[in-house]
């Protein structure tokens, strides 16, 4: 797949034009940021792992009928995806209280929530992605009532599926962030962005050891080993290694690209 011009560069990913109309190439970088860009690092191999983990999760979700932007993985760092207009809201789903929820409301870290909690944050780096209510979303026309209802339902379905998937490999899905967008080709709202240890909190089921980006945020060390551990448990990484070289991945699946109508 020939890569076209750079369309957008974010903190952890770059979007390039592709040869196909309404499809773009998503490139995963090794850059990591936290605390609204105040902490930055380059974590060798992170982009490769996130590309592979996100591909695994998004294609599994597709298999159970949750539409998303993934068309196929192209190589170690890149995926072909549907072009979407991103809804400027981060949808955070929580099963266990930690992070900003505990700080904001004084809830004890590790409190298991009776049912999943969905939070809405306005995607705006300058403002630090503030928490907003449904009413803010409607007032500023970031999304409609129908769209938020539909997305919230999908968030809960995705949570159910991912909780089960991770439970099966001895991992607690503590919380995670999702983004949705309107597909350029037909205007349908679909899941977009990525689902990876950068966007989820994942704790070992027996020890509560953090296997996600909190290792970077909190300087816990062994960031890449934690991401590798997730990939290994999901059956993506075929060996346990403390050294990121060599990483052996299974070959990308041959997927036919369906032309969008
Ligand atoms: N999250 C994310 N991107 C963001 C903010 C949060 O992927 O810009 C994820 C984060 O990894 C965690 C969940 O959303 O899995 C909830 O994050 P929280 O609000 O607790 O973030 P904190 O302020 O603690 O980083």
Image (cartoon, grey):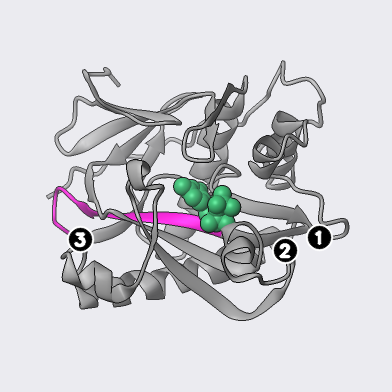
Q: In which quarter of the image is residue 101?
A: bottom right
In the image, is the residue at mark 1 within 8 Å of ligand 1 by its beta carbon?
no
Q: Give the range drawn in magenta.
A: 176-187
User: Mark 2 falls on what kind of element?
Assistant: helix
- In the rendered structure, find residue 167 and report the number of the disc placed on it: 2
- How packed is label 3: few (under 14 Cα within 10 Å), some, or many (20 or more)? few
Q: Is the magenta stretch mostly helix, strand or loop?
A: strand
Q: Which residue is drawn at 19% across and 25% down?
A: 19
Residue at point 48% right, 62% down? 92
Residue linked to disc 3: 188
Task: Please indicate whether residue 128 sits to the left or right of residue 237 in the image.
Answer: left
From this viewpoint, is residue 258 visible?
A: yes
Which quadrant of the structure image shows residue 244?
Answer: top right
Q: Give me the residue at 68% from left, 22% from top.
A: 247
Between residues 195 and 41, which one lies in front from this camera angle? 41
Front residue of this view, candidates 251 and 231 = 231
- The reply to whether discs 2 and 1 touch (Cβ–Cβ < 8 Å) is yes
Q: CA separation, marks 2 and 1?
A: 8 Å
Residue 184 belongs to magenta span: yes
Q: Is mark 3 on a helix, strand or loop?
A: loop
Query: What is the secondary structure assignment of the residue under circle 1?
Result: loop
Rounded to the nearest whole Å, what is the CA distance between mark 2 and mark 3?
A: 31 Å
Q: Residue 110: which quarter of the image?
A: bottom right
Instruction: Report if residue 157 lies within the magenta region.
Output: no
Mark 1 or 3: the one toward you:
1
In screen coordinates, is 142 left or right of 204? Answer: left
Counting other residues with Cα less than 10 Å from the Cα at mark 2, is it few (<14), some (14-19), or many (20 or more)? some
Q: What whole-number distance in Å separates the C-alpha atoms at marks 1 and 3?
A: 36 Å
Query: What residue is pinned by disc 1?
Result: 205
Measured as percent of width and height from the top left, residue 260 is found at 17, 47
Along the polypeptide, which appears first: circle 2 or circle 3?
2
């Amino acid at each position: 797949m020939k890569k076209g011009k750079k369309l957008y560069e974010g903190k952890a990913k770059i979007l390039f034009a592709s040869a196909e109309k309404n499809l773009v190439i998503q490139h995963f970088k090794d850059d990591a940021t936290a605390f609204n860009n105040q902490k930055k690092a380059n974590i060798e191999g992170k982009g490769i792992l996130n590309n592979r983990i996100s591909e695994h999760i998004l294609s599994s979700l597709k298999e159970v009928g949750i539409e998303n932007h993934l068309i196929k993985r192209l190589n170690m760092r890149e995926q072909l995806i549907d072009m979407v207009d991103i809804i400027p809201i981060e949808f955070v789903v929580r099963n266990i209280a930690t992070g900003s929820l505990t700080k904001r409301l004084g809830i004890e870290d590790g409190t298991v929530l009776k049912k999943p909690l969905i939070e809405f944050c306005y995607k705006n780096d300058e403002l630090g992605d503030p928490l907003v209510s449904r009413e803010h979303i409607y007032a500023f026309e970031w999304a409609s009532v129908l769209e938020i209802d539909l997305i919230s339902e999908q968030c809960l379905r995705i949570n159910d599926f991912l909780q089960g998937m991770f439970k099966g490999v001895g991992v607690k899905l503590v919380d995670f962030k999702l983004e949705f967008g309107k597909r350029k080709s037909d205007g349908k709202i679909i899941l977009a962005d990525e689902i990876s240890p950068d966007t989820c909190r994942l704790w070992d089921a027996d020890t509560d050891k953090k296997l996600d980006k909190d290792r970077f945020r909190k300087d816990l060390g062994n960031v890449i080993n934690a991401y590798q551990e997730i990939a290994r448990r999901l059956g993506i990484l075929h060996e346990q290694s403390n050294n990121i070289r060599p990483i052996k991945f299974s070959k990308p699946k041959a997927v036919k690209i369906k032309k969008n109508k």
